[in-house]
Amino acid sequence: MAKLVAIGDSLTQGFQSLAINKTNLSFPAMIAEALGVRVPDFRVPDFLGDGGLPFNVEWLARRLEEKYGDNINAFEWPFALNTIVQLIDDVEDYWERGKGSLPAKDTLYHNLAVWGFKVADAYEINAGMGEIAIQNTKDNWFRPPSEPMLRTAYRVLNPARLPDRMPDTQIKIAKRIKEEDGEIENLIVWLGANNCLNTVVRLRVEESGDEPPDRNSSVTLWTPTAFKKQYDVLAAEIQAIGAKNVYVATVPHVTIPPVSRGIMKNRGRLPQSRKYFDYYTAFYIRDKEFDPNKDPYITGEEAEKVDGYINEYNQIIRDHADDKGWHVMDACAVLDSLAVRRNHGDPSYVLPDAINDLNIRFFEIESNGKIKNGGLISLDGVHPTTCGYAIVAQEFINIMKPHNPGIRDIDFADIRFWDSLVSKPPLTLDDMFGMLKTLEKWFHISRLYISET
């Protein structure tokens, strides 16, 4: 019997700070341990090399700290930029031609999540598509690995690169695990965020029609009708797996994480009577620096529309859960209650004592390394830190308890110890916004988000 299998995207895989790296600290791995199954018995893919895929900003900050010390001054930045170019090239070499490009042991992973996956990708993207995508790669001097999402999918869906596993998708592998192990006791499925995330990453709201767009479309927002057509297929595939207990999660409001920065026209606070700012712009642009005539943004009305569509997505998910006897973890409500600025500085979520000094604002530290802001969202402004993923794990555990006697709660103090960003942040991050602005100016790191589509 397989105690736990997980299907999902970056949130389920454990992606943070622009990379998939420590899959052993993903929230499914935390839940598996609470069920009494630890890694490696709970099987997760290995992405530890050179910070992971596609490019780990925390790893970069630590490499810069090793070379230049606690602070990079104005005279050192030209040299630091050259170091960043070399590090990007090292990462590309590792995953395209080095150890990270080699086949691994043939395994059916229990955590099948792949960052960037949309709803339909769970049953449409197979390992063979990953093989085709990474053929004939070239050595690009300061660009991260090519086709990082499909490269990741290939490593998850067919680690040994066996010909007979090229048709494997997340759904097909879950069915095979059921056939080989006799039963999947708990199946977690969390998909849908990437059907709307690029509205706040690209800062453009471009809707699909009623029909789902193809994979190469520039669409950033699925209409509820298009979303339903794909989720209906996914739901039928999930049901066909035949797991004993199925747990699905709702889609969070993507306008809350600090990847986009809410700004009022008067550069003031969000009025108590309002939930949405006038503008949502790039995360590294400060209020006083924002110029709507030249900076990218979506309007508050557009942000509200995105959230309205997400509410409709979530009703579709709940309707399937009600119809099929699944259990729902309301991730959307959890994030809403954690929101700081939207809740006018008074979030209602009660954090465990070990992490009650953290919040979901953008990560910032003082010059002495003390956390000034954030701690629950990683350096990419979208994905949780390990502490943030622990909250997700505990919320799933809360709804799993009636069906899994003996499941333990998360030890948040222990998780905080293993969260390297929170427990020992690189001191080069004392000007996080300045660093990210520099990375965007010279290396266009926003393209790494766009690779997620």
Image (spheres, rainbow, N blue to C red):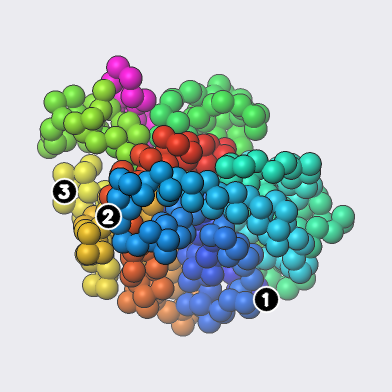
Determine crowd level at label 1: few under 14, some 14-19, many 20+ residues with C-alpha closer than 10 A: few
The spot of residue 416 in percent (x, y) is: 35, 72
In the image, residue 315 above or below residue 54: above
Question: Which range is magenta?
Answer: 292-309
The residue at the point 35 percent across, 62 percent down is 69
Q: Nearer the viewer, mark 2 or mark 1?
A: 2
Say which of 302 and 282 sits in front.
282
Q: Write down the residue under mark 3.
A: 345
Q: Write down the residue under mark 1.
A: 1
Label whose residue precedes the other's in the sequence (2 or 1): 1
Q: Secondary structure at mark 2?
A: helix
Distance in Å between CA atoms under marks 3 and 2: 23 Å
The residue at the point 57 percent across, 60 percent down is 50
Q: Secondary structure at mark 3?
A: loop
Label whose residue precedes the other's in the sequence (3 or 1): 1
Say which of 310 and 50 sits in front.
50
The spot of residue 365 in percent (x, y) is: 25, 58
- The amino acid marked with disc number 1 is Met
Residue 295 within the magenta-colored segment of the rendering: yes
**Occupied quadrant, residue 162:** bottom right
Label whose residue precedes the other's in the sequence (3 or 2): 3
Determine crowd level at label 2: few under 14, some 14-19, many 20+ residues with C-alpha closer than 10 A: many
Left-right relation of 181 to 254: right
In the image, residue 415 above or below residue 72: below
The spot of residue 142 in percent (x, y) is: 57, 42
- The amino acid marked with disc number 3 is Gly
**Occupied quadrant, residue 301:** top left
Q: Nearer the viewer, mark 3 or mark 2?
A: 2
The spot of residue 45 in percent (x, y) is: 64, 64
Assign the N terminus to one quadrant of the image.
bottom right
**Residue 430: image tag:** 2
